[in-house]
Amino acid sequence: MNSYLPIKQQIKLTEQLLAQAQQSYKQKPGGLLNIQKRGSYFQYYFQEEKTKKRTYLSKKNIVLAKELAQKQYDKDFICCATELLRELKKIEKYGASRSVSVIYHSLAEIYENLSAERKTLVDPYVLPDEVYIELWLKQSYKQKPFLPDSPEIYTEKNERVRSKSEKIIADKLAILGIPYRYEYPMILPGIGSIHPDFLLLDIKERTTVIYEHFGLMQDQEYCRNALRKIDAYEKNGYLLGWKFLCTFESEDHVLDMRHFEKMILNRFGEDSHINAGPE
């Protein structure tokens, strides 16, 4: 399935990021940062732009070093974002479309191409995929509590889940490289506080997808609640097949993992097998 953030919204996103970098750049001091490696450590120097004269910066001047490093990053970011904006406006003019992933990939490269030492001094506006995923996975949240008599079922990542099907699903998501949060709390108008089975990260679009596995469809009350939840998702913009995915199971209808994998790859792409971050 192919779906893109509308070009108008991509233009707005790029303009916002560009404005952020431009505002930062205006506030930075004159001069450049020169970094020299001395054995196992680094030394920072303030370099005048015209004369190229260098002055050693001690640890107490680390703020100035960060300002100068950020300044150079801002400059490169502004150059790249300006070019992207020019391209997007051409695309808009001709009524074409393009994935927003191009924006994230191109702008993240500005930070990725920095030396390891400069990365420690810079606050990036767009994170590389791996860093974004790691921070997304590290976000803490409160899951629903387990009842005392609930069976203890754990995934390969040692996460406790509520059913064998959820374990199979979680393990498969990990194999496919789809980052997820299990039972992440949300507020859904029409229902209230909910904990979807899985919240999946679409790293290409930098957005999330709700995935629910309805595993007791033979139960009439459960079935009614499932349909009510699906309806609420749709009404709140979580369109089935894109922002919302689901599978069903009952006593006489088991979960087909071949169908599940096909659904996930159809949504996230055949090249979605990426490192989902640290376990």
Image (cartoon, rainbow, N blue to C red):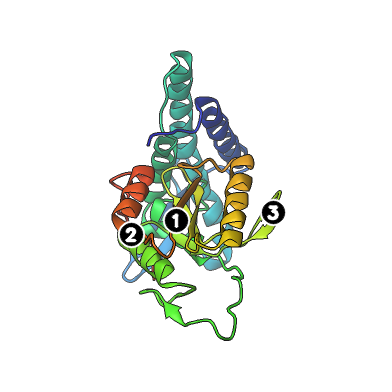
Q: Position of residue 131 (x, y in %)?
A: 43, 57
Q: Residues within 10 Å of mark 2 (few under 14, many from 20)?
A: some
Q: Which mark is residue 275?
A: 2
Q: What residue is shown at x 48% (from left), y 28% (from top)?
A: 82
* 125 in relation to 155, above or below: above
Q: Which mark is residue 269?
A: none
Q: Earlier in the sequence, mark 3 or mark 2?
A: 3
Q: Mark 2 belongs to which amino acid?
A: Asn
The quarter of the displayed image where residue 26 is located: top right
Q: Residues within 10 Å of mark 1 (few under 14, many from 20)?
A: some
Residue with the mark numbered 3 = 191
Q: What residue is shown at x 61% (from left), y 56% (from top)?
A: 225
Badge nearest the viewer, 1 or 3: 1
**Quadrant (top left, top right, bottom left, bottom right) of the C terminus:** bottom left
Q: Earlier in the sequence, mark 1 or mark 3?
A: 3
Residue with the mark numbered 1 = 248
